[in-house]
Amino acid sequence: MFDFVIWDFDGTLFDTYPLIVETYINELALLGIKESDERVERLVRTSFGTLHRYLSESYGLGSEFWEKCSNSRRGEEQKRAFAFKGAFGLLSDIIALGGRNAIYTHRGASTFSLLEKAGMKNLFCDFVTEADNFPPKPSPDAVEALIARNGASKERAIMVGDREIDVGSGINAGINACLFRALSFENTEANFTARDYAELRKIILG
């Protein structure tokens, strides 16, 4: 069993990508720009930075556009963003078996409001969010900080996320990593891969 589990948020704990993609597509349409859902999802699931670079280089969009997207998404998230089926149960079982959960996300304060809405905030012992100003994934800095301040064993810790940058932050910190619900499982550095919470449960709990 892995007894210290570090979770990514979007696309790993919460099914937020459909809303994120919809927000960008709608805001682009208001500017007369047509992009496919598939391309936007692929880019954002690489990283938001990758999507922003593409839109900046292709259409000259900048901070005003990102702010509009953020505000639009924030207004809908409390109504339409939900945890994946199986997440609450697995998090609870990790704790029941003596383990701990932490979150490492590039998301900001909305992390806490969504967790509270889902009744899940108390299932985590520690958090790293945008407000902590760590270098972005795949830097190991935030993972190493979570390990150190919680006295966790690297051998029994795992990073779980849906993107290669999540995997990279774990691998670069010297812990195991699991790639979850990814668009592709090819050429990954991850020690483990999981397509759903049933597979993830077997990996974490053994």
Image: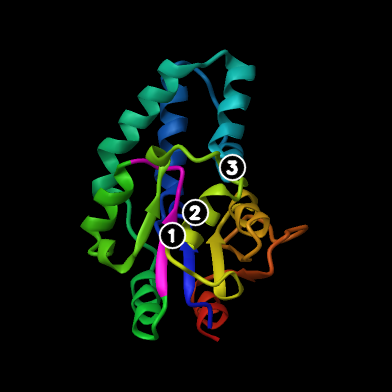
Determine whether 108 is above or below 189 in the image.
above
Front position among marks 3 and 2 = 2
- Residue 176 is marked as none
Helix, strand or loop at disc 3? helix
Residue type (three-letter) at the residue carrying disc 3 = Glu
- Residue 38 is marked as 3
Residue at 47% from the left image edge and 23% from the top image edge: 28
Gap in Å between the C-alphas at discs 3 and 1? Answer: 39 Å
Residue at 73% from the left image edge and 60% from the top image edge: 189
Residue type (three-letter) at the residue carrying disc 2 = Ala
- Residue 145 is marked as 2
Q: Quick one: 3 or 184, which is closer to the camera?
A: 3
Front position among marks 3 and 1 = 1
User: Magenta segment, which residues?
Assistant: 100-108
Residue at 37% from the left image edge and 31% from the top image edge: 70
Gap in Å between the C-alphas at discs 1 and 2? Answer: 6 Å
Q: Which residue is mark 1?
A: 149
Asked if labels 2 and 1 touch by Cβ distance under 8 angstroms, the answer is yes
